[in-house]
Image (cartoon, helix red, strand yellow):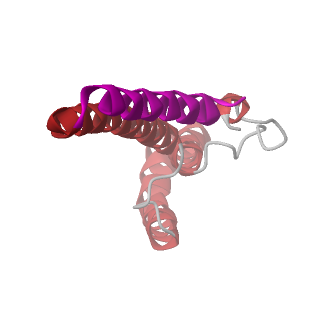
Amino acid sequence: MTGMDARDTDLKKELNATLRARGELGDEYESALVDSFLEKVDQRIDGAVERRVRRQLAEQQMTVARDSRSPKATDTWGERFGFGIVSLVLAVPLSAIGGGVAHLPGLLAAWLGIVGVNVVQAARTDPGLFGRRGHRRQDDAWED
């Protein structure tokens, strides 16, 4: 017997008890008995609604938690493309300054900085980009 069947059975027992009490007590207590039974039904419904609301709230919180670790909705292709263009445009003067001041080591430092900033941006917009594609996310183990 599932949880729903048990609750249905309990409700049927309550209804039968109410009907038996009505038969024993007579018509003058009918409205009080009906009100009492309806109060029990309301409590069951309220409990079921409360459980559903709590479950949905927990699911929403899990979704928000997962989304905070995944690419944001604002991380569109245009934003990534724009970031790449801006980094290349800035690479020209940075390369000139680094190469002009410190020659090859300055040029390497400038390009390591440019590449580093782009790697961080790529990792931020796609967390599974660097070596975690084949692995299942730990959060997925909780999903049914």
The percent coordinates of residue 100 (x first, y second) are 46, 50
Query: What is the quadrant of the N terminus in the image?
Result: top right
Q: Residue furthest bottom?
A: 78
Q: Which residues are magenta?
A: 1-26
Q: Position of residue 113 (x, y in %)?
A: 51, 41
- Direction from residue 1 to residue 99 in the image, left or right: left
The part of the image, by quadrant, that contains residue 56 is: top left
From this view, report whether residue 111 is shown above or below residue 50: below
- Considering the whole magenta stretch, tell me its main secondary structure: helix
Residue 87, horizontal then vertical, whole percent: 47, 60
Residue 79 coordinates in the image, percent (x, y): 44, 67
**Extreme right residue here?**
134
Answer left or right for 39 relative to 2.
Answer: left
The front one of 37 and 106 is 37
* Residue 54 appearing in the image: no
Q: Could you tell me how many numbered marks the image carries?
A: 0
Q: Identify which residue, 98 or 90, lies in the foreground.
A: 90
Image quadrant where one finds the C terminus: top right
Residue 99 among those drawn in magenta:
no
- In this orientation, which residue lies closer to the viewer: 128 or 142? 142
Q: Residue at 85% across / 41% down in the picture?
A: 134
State the image quarter where residue 32 is shown: top left
Whether residue 64 is visible, yes or no, is yes
The answer to whether residue 44 is left or right of residue 137 is: left
Residue located at (57% from left, 47% from top): 111
Residue at image point 47% right, 73% down: 78
- Find out whether residue 7 is within the magenta segment: yes
Q: In front here: 87 or 67?
A: 67
Residue 38, picture quadrant: top left
118 sits to left or right of 15: right
Residue under the point 31% across and 33% down: 22
